[in-house]
Amino acid sequence: MSAKHLIPVFLLGAIGGTARADAVADFTAGTIVLVRGATVDFGGPRTHTGIALRKRAGTLDFDLAAADLGVDNVPITFHLHGTALGGGRILFTVDQRYSPVLALPDRHWLARASGQLSALAMPLPGTVGTADGNVQLTLAGASSLVAEGDWGTLTIAVTQLDLIGGVPQPALAGFADAGGGLLCSDRVATARPLTVWLADVAQGRGAVVQLAGPRAGGVRVPPGFAVPAGGRAVTLNARIDPDFVGPVHLTAAAGGVVRAIDLVVHPHSDCLTR
């Protein structure tokens, strides 16, 4: 078999970028936070969706009104201060004290607003496309907000939170076999270069691309990677299992667009006769 048809297994992963998306950094850079879904327990469950909030670039902080969570009868805005804890976790804390007290409608007053939201930031899957950003935040621990005023203490327990933020990323434009020539099996694992490219350059800390192949094996691809910021294309390797022969359907997805290719791994003897 000619060398151009096979890549030694020790080169697996050597082709293409190894950039990883940084969801917390991208959320920090974003200017919009979309409340895709929120459920709170305040005298019973309440659910709210579809609210877009403004956020300053360069910070994890943003403002969240009680009404954004579906609690319309509590006219209070919570100023969330975000702290990155590592591993994609963000702790949003609130501690607002008012002296003198803050006057509210209907002759009510607010003395303090406090609480915390524990969240996990993750890159949006490549199969999801949205103009609001590339990061999803979900609850990752006990979360509640508290308002103290002339009424006493009101606790809003947040039981579900689904936020979208970060920076918009380009959609997938193409997915192709970059190997050239016949693809044949061998007694040892080999590799086949595959190329993905985007409709525009990747933003933020990189654009996530999802790859998928057959569960039964034969040809294995990394489940996901990031096209580096400023780049449009990446070439990476699929691993061909030893002695595998047959057709394989592979897919790539980014920005809500899915592309597919079909690889055919021929018997070892087919390449020897060429």
Image: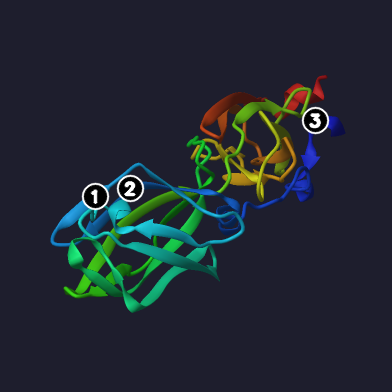
79 or 213, nearer to the observer:
79
Is any atom of residue 187 visible in this view?
no
| Residue 75 image offset from top left, x and y in percent | 27, 59
Q: Position of residue 244 (x, y in %)?
A: 62, 35
Residue 88: where, in percent of width, then height? 53, 62
Quarter in which the C terminus is drawn: top right
Q: Could you tell whether 84 is left or right of 236 in the image?
A: left
Does residue 94 lie above or below 51 as drawn? Answer: below
Mark 2 and mark 3 lie on one chain; the one further toward the N terminus is: 3
- CB under 8 Å between discs 2 and 3: no
Res. 5 mark: 3
Q: Find numbered disc 2 in the image and state the secondary structure of the residue it sits on.
A: strand
Q: Nearer the viewer, mark 2 or mark 3?
A: 2
74 left or right, relative to 231: left
Residue type (three-letter) at the residue carrying disc 3: His
Residue picked out by circle 2: 37
The mark that comes first in sequence, 2 or 1, is 2
Residue plotted at (23% across, 56% down): 71
Which picture quadrant has residue 102?
bottom left
